[in-house]
């Protein structure tokens, strides 16, 4: 901070970064249409918008990755042409990409200095590098072990390494592209604090997100983008979540899930004493007991990595486990294969749809029957019935509002929200008696979130039992009828969603007791 | 951009025609251009040997296509090439790179020879028996690699290469000891019974007809059946396959066995249709050409047919090339190697279609994971 202060002798009214009338066209699309934006040193500006609104295009122009077709970028008042990221970095712009650009087998320090190594002659001076990176991390409160290998670090820590990389290159304009998409609630809170700290030290921060709560919490100015245009500029004190959502989507959006009281029926999932190991062979689930009844939504709240993934995998036959009791619809599901569990009437929305839930190059239609391809209606004696697959697909595409050019379009060509609608449509079309939905709205735009929530509630009202696992506490609280809190492989509390207290659940998620005492600080590594 | 998708009408009438057309055009143009470039470079090599490349290529193609004998030879040569090509194709579709078609073919060729000479059966049973027995030998040989991959995560690339070496030694031993024809010096098995031989249909060899039928059948299997859906799903996304209730291990073992059976059919047809017995010197290199062919065909069973015929023509014409012009016939190997290089590394696709190039056929799913 100290050495940076001398650089910032600018008059206060000259923005650190200013974009004036930027327009960028791609074949068939105007990605940015006359977009203007200014960020002052010491300010956090949030760029809010749905997927495809043009946020990424805008920052890519600012970072020199795209050249604007029209308009101008000014840095500290000076008009510049950025020929590439190198140029942008030289002018003090740093960017933390959504997908990290780290070398997994290098240490934190090595990653940070890569491309700008302190050296003595031709030799990299590792001791000096390590020391500089350590000082930097302390200065900004970015806790990370500088000697750890990046591949061994949790996602939140990897992100801090990315930020350190930008700071190491003396960035005083910092762009964070959807940084919270990969973070747990705790890590998110921590990052928001770090952003404020940057601003306090005179950095200009551009924060890209589609999460309303975060924007209201951290931003000085909010720029809302829709369809490539700035549709509104506001501040947290002048607006609220409903307002922002409407600006983003262009119509009023239901943030609260509208649902009637649950009418629980017979038990569809009955688990007692469930135990399982994680991928490293360490205990991930120790004695989990849980019931889900038809017509109710049971939400599992918890910081990611406390056994939720393993729980879902056990219940869907993807992970070996032992249990005193594991009944689905009254039948023993212990050791059953994914195929058998599907046949018992279980729908599964996997947490990672790209990895587990879809085959990218397959058509939307084939993905809609991915786990039903051998059912009699879709195949006769081993020959696939293409007509009935097409008919099912066209029905589901209409019913679930999947925005795709056609049923034959490869699933990988769709946006995140539409991909997820394909998965949800497939799982609900089979009329499951138990729906297990893991992170059903992760990386999905606001409009689709609303739709997916409504579909889950509709499935409940049609008599399905729903087990919802989500890292978004708001989602769990808004959608569930009952909430169970998971911590270190156990369900530590269960409470009705009606009137549940957010801060109490937060404490339970952090491993605290029921008493209101300060939650233990979370540490990664 | 999603805005783009939103504007498009939501009719489910058909696939996006532009994308479809581009994909189809690339699938044809890229291999074609690759072959042409390979021929051009081959031409330089011929020219360096003091021969006019156009004359040389004319000799090559006339020898292969200019008369009935040549045509029949091309079809005979293409038969095992189609089948080893299909063997590699099936593997690629299921995410496996079977380098072992050569070994599977050898084991099947000697198996079919034994089934052909050691039994006295009516022709209607004997011929199918010899072919099926050969296929089973190939399938069993390939399954070793399949089981190791499925249950022990051993790369099939490594194991199939090693199994090739073992197969060469094994058939050498079998043909020089237990299965050797008595009372003569050569390392070879006895001739098969006439009941096991492929009947002569005139210009078009019967083995070629079988290979064409198998290619079409395999194309249908992969695109229209639930079994093919399993193969493709495991090949494209094993995680999603597991999620969808498909047994990934079972599919890997099965795909490897089918792959071995196809290569095996190629070897068995060589034995009962061409050589009439097993001799270790025959059959060299057929399995390796199968890799070139499968990649040239972009893992498409139907496209395997023209790709294999092209290689068949080159192999047929190579002998006359040396005979009539004095050029080293290895020029043909150079042309094939260059073709493979350009198809496997997406050089031509990038050049012609820039960033809209199709991804090259993926062949290394097993590496490093």
Image (cartoon, coloured by chain):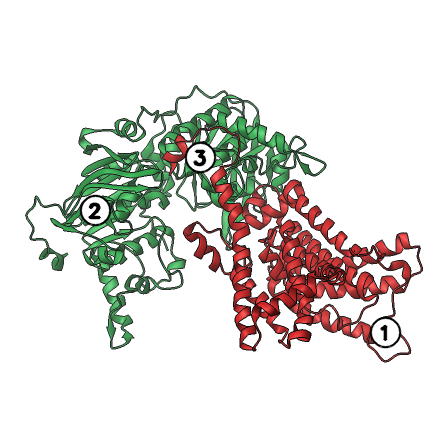
Chain colours: A green, B red
In the shown orientation, is residue A325 left or right of residue A63?
Answer: right
Q: Is residue B70 above or below residue B352?
A: below
Is label 3 on the same chain as label 1? Answer: no
Give percent across and percent down for residue A129: 26, 67
Question: Where residue A360 appears, x then y in whole percent?
Answer: 50, 44
Q: Quadrant of residue B153?
A: bottom right
Label 3: how many residues lie within 10 Å, few (<14), some (14-19) or many (20+)?
A: many
Q: Chain of mark 2?
A: A
Q: Badges 2 and 3: C-beta atoms under 8 Å apart?
A: no
Mark 2 vs 1: CB contact within 8 A: no
Q: Chain of mark 3?
A: A
The residue shown at (18%, 39%) is A220
Q: Which residue corresponds to mark 3? A: A418
Q: Is residue B39 above or below residue A359?
A: below
Residue to which mark 2 is pinned: A205
Secondary structure beneath label 1 = loop
> Is the C terminus of chain A in the top left, top right, bottom left or bottom right quadrant?
bottom left
The quadrant where residue A306 appears: top left
Q: Residue at x 34, y 39 (%)?
A: A507
- Please name which of the two marks, 3 or 1, marks the residue nearer to the observer: 1
Residue at mark 2 shares a chain with residue at mark 3: yes
Give coordinates of residue B203: x percent, y percent: 79, 57
Q: Which mark is residue B180?
A: 1
């Amino acid at each position: 901070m100290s050495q940076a202060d001398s650089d910032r002798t600018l008059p206060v009214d000259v923005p650190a970064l200013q974009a004036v009338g930027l327009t960028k066209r791609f074949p068939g699309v105007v990605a940015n249409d006359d977009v203007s934006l200014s960020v002052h040193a010491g300010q956090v500006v949030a760029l809010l918008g749905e997927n495809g609104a043009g946020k990424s295009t805008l920052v890519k122009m600012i970072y020199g990755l795209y050249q604007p077709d029209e308009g101008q970028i000014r840095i500290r008042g000076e008009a510049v042409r950025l020929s590439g990221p190198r140029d942008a970095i030289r002018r003090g712009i740093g960017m933390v990409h959504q997908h990290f650009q780290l070398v997994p087998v290098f240490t934190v320090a090595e990653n940070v200095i890569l491309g700008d190594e302190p050296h003595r002659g031709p030799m990299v001076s590792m001791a000096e590098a390590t020391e500089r990176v350590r000082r930097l991390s302390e200065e900004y409160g970015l806790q990370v072990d500088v000697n750890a290998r990046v591949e061994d670090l949790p996602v939140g820590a990897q992100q801090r390494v990315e930020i350190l990389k930008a700071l190491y290159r003396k960035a005083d304009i910092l762009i964070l592209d959807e940084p919270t998409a990969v973070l747990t609630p705790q890590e998110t809170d921590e990052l928001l604090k770090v952003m404020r700290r940057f601003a306090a030290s005179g950095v200009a921060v551009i924060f890209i997100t589609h999460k309303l709560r975060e924007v209201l919490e951290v931003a000085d100015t909010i720029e809302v983008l829709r369809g490539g245009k700035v549709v509104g500029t506001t501040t947290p004190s002048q607006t609220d979540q409903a307002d922002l959502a409407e600006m983003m989507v262009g119509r009023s959006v239901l943030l609260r899930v509208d649902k009637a009281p649950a009418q629980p029926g017979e038990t569809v999932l009955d688990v007692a004493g469930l135990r399982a190991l994680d991928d490293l062979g360490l205990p991930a689930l120790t004695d989990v007991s849980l019931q889900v009844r038809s017509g109710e939504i049971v939400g599992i709240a918890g910081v990611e990595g406390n056994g939720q993934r393993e729980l879902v995998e056990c219940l869907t036959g993807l992970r070996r486990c032992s249990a005193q009791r594991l009944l689905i619809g009254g039948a023993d599901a212990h050791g059953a294969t994914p195929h058998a569990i599907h046949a018992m009437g279980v729908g599964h929305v996997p947490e990672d749809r790209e990895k587990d839930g879809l085959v990218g190059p397959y058509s939307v239609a084939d993905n809609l029957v991915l786990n039903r391809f051998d059912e009699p209606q879709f195949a006769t004696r081993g020959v696939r019935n293409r007509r009935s697959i097409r008919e099912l697909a066209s029905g589901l595409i209409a019913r679930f509002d999947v925005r795709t050019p056609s049923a034959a379009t490869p699933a990988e060509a769709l946006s995140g929200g539409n991909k997820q609608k394909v998965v949800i449509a497939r799982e609900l079309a089979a009329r499951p008696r138990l729906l297990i939905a893991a992170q059903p709205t992760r990386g999905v735009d606001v409009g689709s979130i609303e739709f997916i929530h409504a579909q889950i509630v509709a499935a409940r009202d049609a008599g399905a039992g729903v087990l919802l696992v989500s890292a978004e506490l708001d989602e769990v609280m808004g959608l569930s009828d009952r909430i169970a809190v998971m911590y270190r492989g156990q369900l530590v509390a269960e409470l009705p969603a009606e009137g549940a207290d957010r801060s109490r659940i937060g404490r339970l998620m952090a491993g605290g007791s029921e008493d209101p005492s300060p939650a233990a600080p979370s540490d990664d590594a | 951009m999603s805005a783009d998708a939103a504007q498009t009408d939501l009719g489910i009438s058909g696939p996006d025609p532009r994308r479809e057309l581009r994909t189809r055009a690339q699938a044809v143009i890229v291999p074609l251009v690759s072959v042409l470039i390979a021929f051009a470079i081959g031409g330089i090599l011929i020219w360096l040997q003091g021969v006019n490349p156009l004359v040389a290529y004319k000799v090559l193609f006339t020898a292969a296509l200019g008369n009935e004998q040549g045509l029949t030879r091309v079809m005979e040569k293409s038969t095992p090439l189609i089948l080893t090509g299909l063997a590699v194709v099936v593997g690629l579709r299921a995410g496996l790179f079977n380098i072992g078609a050569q070994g599977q073919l050898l084991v099947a060729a000697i198996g079919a020879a034994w089934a052909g000479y050691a039994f006295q059966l009516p022709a209607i049973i004997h011929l199918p028996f010899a072919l099926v027995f050969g296929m089973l030998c190939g399938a069993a040989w390939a399954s070793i690699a399949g089981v190791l991959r499925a249950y022990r995560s051993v790369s099939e690339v490594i194991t199939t290469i090693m199994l090739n070496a073992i197969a060469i030694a094994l058939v050498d031993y079998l043909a020089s000891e237990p299965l050797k024809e008595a009372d003569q010096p050569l390392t070879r098995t006895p001739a098969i019974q006439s009941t096991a031989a492929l009947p002569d249909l005139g210009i078009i060899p019967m083995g070629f007809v079988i290979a064409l039928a198998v290619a079409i059948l395999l194309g249908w299997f992969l695109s229209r059946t639930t079994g093919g859906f399993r193969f493709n799903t495991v090949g494209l996304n094993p995680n999603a396959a597991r999620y969808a209730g498909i047994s990934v291990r079972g599919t890997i073992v099965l795909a490897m066995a089918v792959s071995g059976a196809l290569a095996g059919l190629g070897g068995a047809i060589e034995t009962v249709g061409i050589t009439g017995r097993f001799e270790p010197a025959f059959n060299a290199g057929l399995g390796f050409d199968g890799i070139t062919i499968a990649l040239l065909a972009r893992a498409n069973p139907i496209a395997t047919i023209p790709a294999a015929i092209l290689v068949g023509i080159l192999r047929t014409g190579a002998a006359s090339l040396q005979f009539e012009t004095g050029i080293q016939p290895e020029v043909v190997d150079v042309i094939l190697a260059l073709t493979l290089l350009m198809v496997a590394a997406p050089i031509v696709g990038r050049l012609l279609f820039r960033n809209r190039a199709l991804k090259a056929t993926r062949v290394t799913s097993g590496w490093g994971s």
